[in-house]
Image: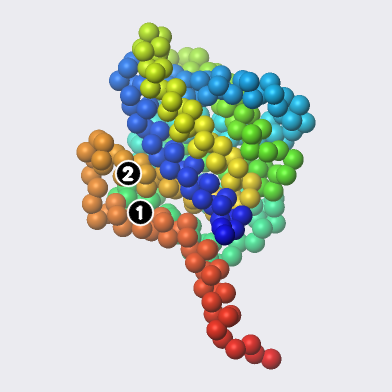
Amino acid sequence: MIKFENKAKLACAYGGMVWGVFWIPLRALDDAGISDVWATVVFYFLPLMALVPLILYRWRHIIRGGWRLQLIGFFAGFSMVLYSNAFLYTEVVRAILLYYLCPIWGTLLARIFLKESIIPIRILSICLGMAGMLVIFGADVGVPWPKYAGDWISLSSGIIWAIAMVLMRNDESNGAIELTTTYFIWGTITAVIIACLPFSREFSTLEIGSLINSLPWLLPVLLIVVLPGVYAVMWGTPHLNPGIAGLLFMTEIIVGSSTAAILANEPFGLREITGIVLITLAGLTESIGHYFTRFVRFFLPNEK
């Protein structure tokens, strides 16, 4: 039987996989004339509309969640909106690399605010994850120190997501349903605000007719893929150390690079495979270490 913590890890890994295929409907929306910041608005607004009956049914639970629930929803939703828009102002590789420093921020914040220890094997996990990411995107990229506006946006989104993970950690007062609904509420609010800002308008287009024509395929994607993926993240994250959760979300890179190779004919060779292996090991290192320790203790004689 799978342990509860391992179920939480699988949920976060699944959520990362769902994020890894976001580029497919986003590219389809762009081809349909709904680009950039407005595509982000659509991705939050339509699931929110689908959740309205659930929000009305669970409104007492949402109100009972108080400021902590609203803070989690705000930080989580705002983080993903920032991450989506960071690609407008910098290179894709730089945005991804800077955002996925979040396992480091999550580990440090958990140490400061939750008093969770930083064990050596977790440092190894983070190093493996970072190495795998650098291998996939090219070792020549190096450390992408923030230089463009999009770099700072992406870096900020990773830090904000780490804050959300710390707030969710061991939060027993709010369930995954409440976390998911507030995530989409605040995601929609922040996405609309950003889309209406003057500097965003030059990057965005919204064709209402194209949006209506896209609904037959877009709604199933959002309801069958996106919503369960977000729910999995909101269910699994509170039960894991923020650093580990951040590493597990790196499955986005694995799935994103794999699907891009299959559907968009982007490069996929030894470098990508090596990076995927390293990222996979990063997510499994603590579990492997745990079972190895149990194995050693079982077979070695007890010393008195």
Q: Residue furthest top?
A: 209
**Residue 68 in the image: x percent, y percent?**
72, 36
User: Quick check: can you spot residue 205?
Assistant: no
The residue carrying pointer 2 sits among few (fewer than 14), some (14 to 19) or many (20 or more) residues within 10 Å by Cα, namely many
Q: Nearer the viewer, residue 118 or 5?
A: 5
Q: Which residue is mark 2?
A: 257
Q: Residue at x 23, y 44 (%)?
A: 267
Q: In the displayed structure, does residue 170 sit left or right of residue 263?
A: right
Checking the image for residue 187, the label placed there is none
Q: Residue at x 70, y 44 (%)?
A: 171
Q: Residue furthest bottom?
A: 304
User: Quick check: can you spot residue 217?
Assistant: yes
**Residue 216 in the image: x percent, y percent?**
39, 18
Q: Are marks 2 and 1 in contact (CB under 8 Å)?
A: yes
Q: Is residue 159 above or below residue 214?
A: below
Query: Label 1 sits on what residue type?
Result: Ile
Q: Nearer the viewer, residue 299 or 183?
A: 299
Q: Tell which circle, 2 or 1, labels the residue nearer the N-terminal end.
A: 2
**Residue 14 in the image: x percent, y percent?**
47, 45
Is label 2 in a helix, a strand or a loop? helix
